[in-house]
Amino acid sequence: MPTKKPRYTVTVDEDLLKEIDDFRFENRYSSRSAATLDLIRLGMKSLKKQQADKAKIAPKK
């Protein structure tokens, strides 16, 4: 059954693909796509935390 979720293509080099595949197998993801989605979620969460931390220590004007 096709998904109604939006799709897009990402092109990566061989080294990054190997890192994604290593992450996938080490964490037992069922597919490369599932591993990539989780990596994106983890990255977004980390970015938001960094931005929040930076906002807390920014000098008040």
Image (cartoon, rainbow, N blue to C red):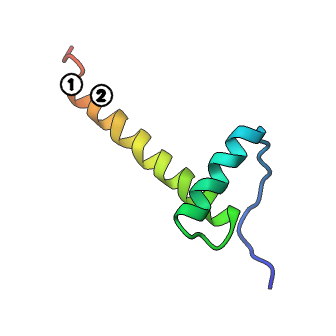
In which quadrant of the rendered image does the C terminus lie? top left
Residue that badge 2 annotates: 54
- Residue pictured at 63% horizontal, 47% vertical: 19
Left or right for 4, reference 43: right
- Residue 42: give x, y in percent of width and height: 47, 52
Contact flag, marks 2 and 1 (Cβ < 8 Å): yes
- CA gap, disc 2 to disc 1? 5 Å
Question: Secondary structure beneath disc 2?
Answer: helix
- Residue pictured at 69% horizontal, 62% vertical: 32
Kindly indicate the quadrant of the structure image that contains residue 60. top left
Residue that badge 1 annotates: 57
Q: Is residue 35 above or below residue 3?
A: above
Q: Is residue 45 above or below residue 27?
A: above
Pick the front one: 40 or 16? 16
Pick the front one: 55 or 31? 31
- Residue pictured at 49% horizontal, 46% vertical: 43
* Mark 2 Cα-neighbour bin, 10 Å: few <14, some 14–19, many ≥20: few
Pick the front one: 1 or 4? 1
Q: Is residue 46 above or below residue 34?
A: above
> Tag 1: residue type?
Ile
- Residue 30: give x, y in percent of width and height: 64, 73
- Residue 39: give x, y in percent of width and height: 55, 53
Left or right for 37, reference 32: left
* Mark 1 Cα-neighbour bin, 10 Å: few <14, some 14–19, many ≥20: few
Q: Is residue 33 above or below residue 50?
A: below
- Residue 26: give x, y in percent of width and height: 54, 62
Question: Secondary structure beneath disc 1?
Answer: helix
- Residue pictured at 21% horizontal, 24% vertical: 57
> Tag 2: residue type?
Lys
